[in-house]
Amino acid sequence: MRSGYDFVIAGGGVVGASVAFHLAELSDASVALLDRGEVCSGGTGRSCAIIRSHYSVASNTALTLRSLDVFRDFREALGEGDVECGFVNSGYLILSGPGAFADQLADNLARQRALGADTSSIGRAEARERHPWLELGDVAAIGWEPASGYADPVGTTNGYVTAARRRGVAVFENTPVERLRLAPASGPPAARVTGVTTPDGDVEAECVVSAVGPWTRGLYADSGLSDDAEALRLQVSRHVVLTFGSVAPYGPELPIVKDLTVDNKMYFRPADGGDVLVGTGDFGDPLEDPDRMTAAAPRDLVSLQQAQIGARMPAFEGAPLTDSWVGPYDITPDWNPVLGPAPSLPGLYLAYGFSGHGFKMAPAIGRCVAQSLLGEAPDVDLEPYRPERFEQEALLLGAYGSGSIS
């Protein structure tokens, strides 16, 4: 490893990989991407990789619409003929029961159309045509996004890494950033970031991009910045994904479903092998240390999700659990990411708190962050995601309350 770069990116998940690619694509800057394990071995590798534009925060929709264009033509977007993101254009259904959510859904669909999203309100009959497995008797409003779908998180991340390497990015796996390197500054703030320390030595950088997600607080603490770590306003939770089997195969062409009629805002989509993949849009179990995350699925959650998926799709009533896995979520108070220079540490750019949005936004976020780092105007204004917004009480609050559908 050379001793210095213009940019060092800590974190080889999909966000870090996208930032690295776009820095190399847009400039001649020297860039290094460092991961504590293998690329995509953290939260990205456990992502359900759903891609949809249904948000009630306008900037989220703007980012996901640009990202959707990339997923739909991944090779052309990266300029590489041999990369694959595994995008499946299944479409996306949003179900709401009667009451406030139904009104909010209608309002959001109108806002999204104004932003250029291909989305509409449909009735139960049309929804059943698109997804014949569904029981919709308790559903009052339905949104439909025909262009949405899901992808392969590992293939997507490796695609960005491959394209980044070919543009000169140095990629170092099994190279954790142990701490930030700090140097005294002449005025407030009293210090600035000048690089990182790894097991292989110190690496200088004009700018360090922290894209380690759930490990962000630990990076601050290990650097002796405990006060700054408290100011991150970051919580980490453990999210469980389950798959259930049915007598008939659950085909890959069936739409993704977001079910706002249940408290945990369940979502489900086709999984490998004809099973259904089921997750939640709620907070999950609090997690102090993402390195100490138990892999077992709680029995009460399995029973709850089994009952809910069976009620929504009678073919899955009493269906057996076929697999489960867990992943960490890095969650901010408004369930939206933090993107921008660290207020008290010049030389550090923050990218954390994706709260379940990271994969679907990563193509556009990587480009916008790279543009910002290079002094260019980003395609989508990132000011709403600034780190200072929490103390400024300028939270990005979604219409559906706390959860990953903001």
Image (cartoon, helix red, strand yellow):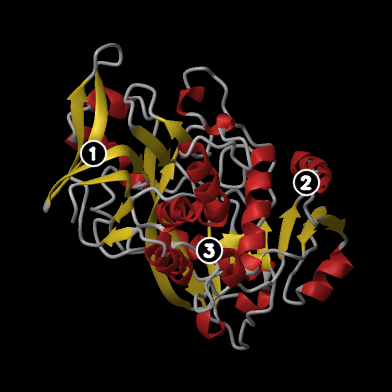
Whole-percent x and y of residue 33? Answer: 32, 54
The residue mark sitting in front, 2 or 1, is 1
Query: N-terminal of the two: label 2 or label 3?
Result: 3
The amino acid type found where label 2 is placed reads Gln
Q: Report which residue position mark 2 lands on.
A: 112
| Residue at the farthest front position | 28
Q: CA distance from mark 2 to mark 1?
A: 41 Å
Q: CA distance from mark 2 to mark 3?
A: 21 Å
Query: N-terminal of the two: label 2 or label 1?
Result: 2
Query: N-terminal of the two: label 3 or label 1?
Result: 3
The amino acid type found where label 1 is placed reads Gly
Q: Report which residue position mark 3 lands on.
A: 49
Where 250 falls versus 227 (above or below)? below
Instruction: Identify which residue is drawn at 39% across, 48% down.
Output: 29
Whole-percent x and y of residue 17? Answer: 41, 57
- Location of residue 319 (image quadrant): bottom right
Q: Is residue 231 visible?
A: yes
Where's the C terminus, which quadrant?
A: top right
Residue 180 falls left or right of residue 189 = left
Could you say whether the residue bearing mark 2 is in a helix, strand or loop?
helix
Q: CA distance from mark 3 to mark 1?
A: 32 Å
Label 2 crowd (10 A; few <14 / some 14-19 / many >=20): many
Q: Is residue 269 visible?
A: no
Instruction: Identify which residue is drawn at 39% across, 23% down.
Output: 343
Where 121 falls versus 146 (above or below)? above
The amino acid type found where label 3 is placed reads Ala
Where 349 falls versus 66 (above or below)? above
Q: Report which residue position mark 1 lands on.
A: 195
Give yes or no for contact between labels 2 and 1 (Cβ–Cβ under 8 Å). no
Could you say whether the residue bearing mark 3 is in a helix, strand or loop?
loop
